[in-house]
Every structure is written in C-alpha cells, then in structure tokens.
Image (tube, helix red, strand yellow):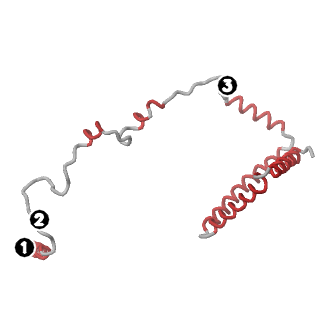
Amino acid sequence: MAISYAGASSSMASATTGLLPRVPTIQSTRCLALPYLPSRLSAALFSTDPRIFSESTRFSSLKSKASSTEETSLDAGELLSDLKEKWDAVENKSTVLLYGGGAIVAVWLSSTVVGAINSVPLLPKIMELVGLGYTGWFVYRYLLFKSGRKELAEDIESLKKKVAGNE
C-alpha cells in the first residue's frame, strides 16, 4: 500500500509540474516569499504609533483623583431622606403609582412600535422625511419670525399655567 501511495504522489507531482511556473530552487532554511522582519520588541521601542503603548501609559498624564468638596458632595442618606419626605407629602399615592406604571408601559409600547416600524424596509426613511418636514414647518412657523416666537412663548406660558393648575 505504501508503494501505491508513493506512486500516486509522484504521478500527481508530475501532473502539476506543467501547471506551475519554474522557480529556481535554493538550498536555504529561510522562506524566500516573506521579507525579513525585525522582532516586535525592537520595533516597538522606536515606534511612535499610539496603538503600541498600553492605555495606562498613554493616559497617565490625564489621570486625576476625585476630590470631595462640600459644594459637590452628595450624601446618599440625605438624598433618601429627601425622597422620603417628598413621598410622605404626596396625598394620593395610588394615583402617582398608577401614572408611573402607565408611563413605563407607554415607553415600552412605544419602543415596540418604533422597532416594528423600523423593521419595515421603506417606512423608516419615510418617517425621517415626515420628521424633517415637520421640523421645517415648525421652524418656519414659530422660530423664524419675531411674531412667531412671541406666539410660541405665549403658548408655552398658557400650557405651564394649565399644568400647574393656575388657569
């Protein structure tokens, strides 16, 4: 069996000899197809490539320590006590919980709808076009001219009064 294998390999070599270009054979242990490359260590010592250096070496001058001052200090206990006082001041807690839960469900539902719209091939681009058109109309109607800006400010103030319950 070894003889037939050797014969098959020699016949295969003779068949492919006509297909490959002749390359002069040099008795060497090095591969001639690749150029000689210096070792990575010597190249890294003289290189200015920022990818070679570690992150800690690159950003050592940018490191800073956090400092605690009275103006920016935030105590977790103080924050919790503040929230507890505000929660105790709420008269109708069930309504607040209902509105909060409804807001979470609305955000989840809108996220699902936007994901479904985004999966339809042409619809996202049409929605972008509609958004750009509305933005252009809004800028032209309320922001471009002084009378439009005044009208927008009045509308915002009346909305603030309605939300606050002053109207």
Position of 30 with respect to 137 (left or right) is left
Badge number at residue 3: 1
Indicate the position of residue 114 as horizontal and vertical percent values.
66, 62
Badge number at residue 71: 3
Vertical placement of residue 51 versus 115, above or below: above
Three-letter code, disc 3: Glu
Q: Residues within 10 Å of mark 1 (few under 14, many from 20)?
A: few
Position of 158 with respect to 77 (left or right) is right
Assign a secondary structure to mark 2. Answer: loop
Q: Which residue is found at the position 76% from the left and 51% from the top?
A: 143
Q: Which residue is found at the position 67% from the left and 28% from the top?
A: 75
Q: Nearer the viewer, residue 85 or 16?
A: 16
Three-letter code, disc 2: Val
Locate residue 12: give its quadrant.
Answer: bottom left
Indicate the position of residue 108 as horizontal and vertical percent values.
69, 56
Vertical placement of residue 80 versus 167, above or below: above
Task: Specify the quadrant that holds the N terminus.
Answer: bottom left
Indicate the position of residue 131 as horizontal and vertical percent values.
69, 61
Residue hosting label 2: 23
Assign a secondary structure to mark 3. Answer: loop
Three-letter code, disc 1: Ile
Q: Which residue is found at the position 67% from the left and 25% from the top?
A: 71
Q: Residues within 10 Å of mark 3 (few under 14, many from 20)?
A: few
- Which label lies toward us, 2 or 1? 2
Q: CA distance from mark 3 to mark 2?
A: 78 Å
Residue that sits furthest to the top in the current view = 70
Say how many tags the image has: 3
Position of 33 with respect to 156 (left or right) is left
Q: Going from the N terminus, do you reach mark 1 or mark 3 first?
A: 1
Assign a secondary structure to mark 1. Answer: helix
Residue that sits furthest to the right in the current view = 167
Q: Going from the N terminus, do you reach mark 2 or mark 1 first?
A: 1
